[in-house]
Image (cartoon, rainbow, N blue to C red):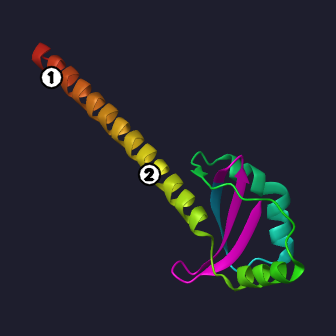
Amino acid sequence: MKLTVFFDEHLQFWVGVIEEETDGRLRAVKHFFGKEPKDAEILDFIHHDMQRLLGTTTQTLQTSPREQRRINPKRMSRIAAREVQQKGASTYAQQVISMEYEHRKLERKSDSKRLQEELKERKYALKVQKAKLKHRGK
């Protein structure tokens, strides 16, 4: 599991991206912190909200399996320095987050369409009922 906190210039917010890879599947979630989070806020988020938030995602992405072998300490420090310099989340995480966004957008669209149809049916039923009452002279 990996948490990356960075400042998003487009949104003007501090954003945290959580990535979790299990069994070759990657799940990712974006969390908006708003103003720059303090270390205590990040720790509180990790201990209380991170698992719950990661449980809400339904979209995953297949990743290629990596070999687990010992990495030279110098290489590890170069990798760590590269990740510190990197702004934002990995491309895989961005793909998963956009897939989740599209999935929720489709759900929201279908729900609003269903509610619109129900409202239309209710209005029509009320209109018919009023017409019947009017026809009876009431």
Above/below status of 28 relative to 33: above
Q: Quadrant of residue 41?
A: bottom right
- Seen from the viewer's position, the closer of residues 120 and 69 is 69
Q: Can you tell which mark lies on residue 24? A: none
Q: Is residue 74 magenta?
A: no
Extreme-top residue of the structure? 136
Which quadrant, please, contains the N terminus?
bottom right
- The crowd level at tag 1 (other Cα within 10 Å; few <14, some 14-19, many 20+) is few
Residue 131, which numbered label?
1
Q: Position of residue 112 (x, y in %)?
A: 38, 43
Where is residue 79 shown, x and y percent of the image? Answer: 76, 79
User: Which residues fall within the magenta stretch?
Assistant: 1-26
Q: Is residue 19 magenta?
A: yes
Q: Which quarter of the image is occupied by the C terminus?
A: top left
N-term mark: 1 or 2? 2
Secondary element at tag 2: helix
Residue type beneath disc 2:
Lys
Q: Is residue 138 visible in the rendered structure shown here?
A: no
40 left or right of 36 in image: right
Residue at 66% x, 82% y is 86
